[in-house]
Image: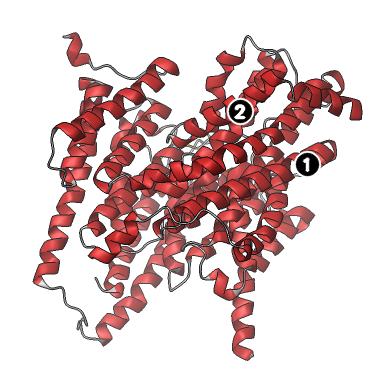
Amino acid sequence: MNQDIKNIIGGCFFLALSIIYGILASSISLFVVGSSQLFTARTIPLALSTIGTVCSFFLILPSFIRILRTRFTYSHPIKKQEHSNLISLGKSVAFFLLLMTAYALLFQILGFIIASTGLIYAGTRILGERKIIQPLMISFGIVMGFWLLISLFLDIYLPSGWIWGI
Amino acid sequence: MWEGILTGLSTAFTPFNLLMVITGCVAGTFIGLLPGLGPITAIALMIPITFDMNPSSGLILMAGVYYGAIFGGSTSSILINAPGVAGTVATTFDGYPLAQKGLAGKALTVAAYSSFFGGTVGAILLFIASPALTHVATSFQSADYFALMIMGLTAVAAFSSKGNFLKSILMTVLGLMLATIGTDLSTGVQRFVFGSISLVDGISFLLIAMATFAIGEVLFNIYNGENMTKPQKTTMKRKLGKLRLSKEEFKEITPTMGRSSILGFLVGVLPGAGATIASFLAYGFERSIAPKEKQKKFGSGSLRGLAAPETANNAASSGAFVPLLTLGIPGSGTTAVMLGALLSFGIQPGPRLYVEHPAIFWSVIISMYIGNIILLILNLPLIPYIAKLLNIPRKYLSPLILFFSLIGVYLVSFNIFDMYLMVILALLSFFLRILEFPMPPLMLGFVLGGMIEENLRRALQVNNNSFSFLWERPITFTLLIVTVFLLTIPLLRRVLAKRS
């Protein structure tokens, strides 16, 4: 991706974030006693929103002008092969994010040991591991070792899964 | 005093107490390696174990665990970009790039030597100057702390090269924004919580560190990994590298360690400042005074950039014991736990501690130093084995980092909401990494954000809502002048270079 395009996308993201943050900051409810003071709970958020807006504007502007000057011509257009690679890599990242969400969802239902073994095993599968027994054994071994250390030795609570109590 | 020191020496060198230091260092290193279990947790876990011991042995064990956990935290920062505690965030800035370049062994060696050097200077200063330094600790006010935090922000400059200045500023702003989430402690007003109870206490440091550094890095590696050409993949695998430092490298880092240890110790003495600020300050300071060609290496694998925060955070950890032992004021979360431990032994820290319990006072200081020596002796031979962590195939290492990050965050709050929040922040971090936004300024802003706001508010209240404290208080004014100086050195150099 062209550096200028990256700057514009990033700048627009921060511009939107700063504006939304500023709007939310101005609606922070203040207590009557403190509202008349120079420094309130809104002061720093509003200052940050202003700085963010100004900086993102300055990040976007030069890149935007440069793109206009070059009339949208890129020196390295994305090739078809490169494009399909990016899509498949993006898919792996998306699967990892989904895996993390699923882990959070199932953590208390299935319990620490099963959910964690599943997380590590599924992670290895996403990254191209085709064997079944070896990664499963490794995942289970690591999780059990961690469970022994945390739960038995250090006496820290880890959920055992409420599904097994039904 | 000398009688007390001799008593302390004889106590610290008993076989049982030496065994306690070794046990503490080993246990601390392994606990520190696990994300979510930093020095505070490590010491807290030791309290029940030390109940039956005599106070000296108990405290000696805790001192060993403390140093071990700090070193363990640095190791995970260098090898897998997962800073388990705020004090080791700055270690990732150059430690992880070194590991990526195939110099993990060297990076760990520098970390071990720097930690030892910082700990040694810290222990010596603690030994000779602790009563005198209590005055420094008490003379700092909110205005001075505010100036000190602003000085800490100068480290952002290290990531502003190659047209990244605005991106670094924006990432710092994002970090500061994230720090405002939760209850404003001074007024009790809730900010940006969107009705969620889980956000009332704000977002934990560990959550942000793991989401943006560890998981962000994993996702980014997956995204980049399959694009790699074969030669690149070979270099990624050969990550151990040499362990020995050359004479030139030693020469390069020795002055850095000297400067950073004194700076770190002095910052550590200030209650509330601690190892995090010390490491950021040392990093920023070292970058500012580095020659132009060395300056460019900061953030992409500079040995000086690694030695500075590593030395400073260890020296600061020793410095944090000054207000604890001499005033009874815990300067950091870890020393607060230590205070609890001291009280549980029936010892009240304060000005009379080294008069009433000289054996305890001096044996703790001496064993902290012994802990440093043992840590160096234990860890240097262990480095090749620790660094082998990197030889684990990516398809196993990445899911393991994911697992340890998620469970580490859960172990801090025991709240599933934090895991969901982590997914969102990891996605955000991945998106920003693709757009080439640097991550360290975000952590810098987040860590310093709350303290900057709090101290500015207090300073304004004390000064009747006037900003005059910025130029009226000598310490504040000096710190701000130093900040301006640190920021303008690179500019001045550039101007001078152009003229010549």
Residue placed most toward the observer, B355 or B164: B355
Check the picture and name the quadrant holding the N terminus of chain B: top right
Q: Quadrant of residue B234?
A: bottom left
User: For mark 1, what is the residue?
Assistant: B124
Q: With A132 as the anchor, is B312 left or right in this view? A: right
In the image, which disc is placed on residue B194? Answer: none
First in sequence: mark 1 or mark 2? 2
Which of B182/B312 is in front?
B312
Please, is residue B96 above or below residue B140 in the view? below
Residue B279, visible in the rendered structure: yes
Badge 1 vs badge 2, beta-carbon distance below 8 Å: no
Q: Position of residue B45 (x, y in %)?
A: 52, 21
Q: Which residue is mark 2?
A: B22
Q: Dot 1, how many residues are within 10 Å of its Cα: few (below 14), some (14-19), or many (20+)? A: some
Instruction: Measuring from the top left, give residue B266's x and y in whole percent.
Output: 73, 47
From the viewer's perspective, tell me whether residue B17 is left or right of residue A139: right
Task: Please give the name of the residue rendered at 69% of the width and 60% of the height, measured from the top-left corner.
Answer: B255
Q: State the residue at coordinates (39%, 39%).
A: B207
Label 2 resides on the chain identified as B
Label 1's element?
helix
Tell me the kind of residue under disc 2.
Ile
Q: Residue B304's spot in the image, x, y percent? A: 58, 60
Q: Which quadrant of the structure image shows residue A110?
A: top left
Q: Say which element carries label 2.
A: helix
Q: Who's the residue at 31% across and 63% down the image?
A: B435
Q: CA distance from mark 1 to mark 2?
A: 21 Å
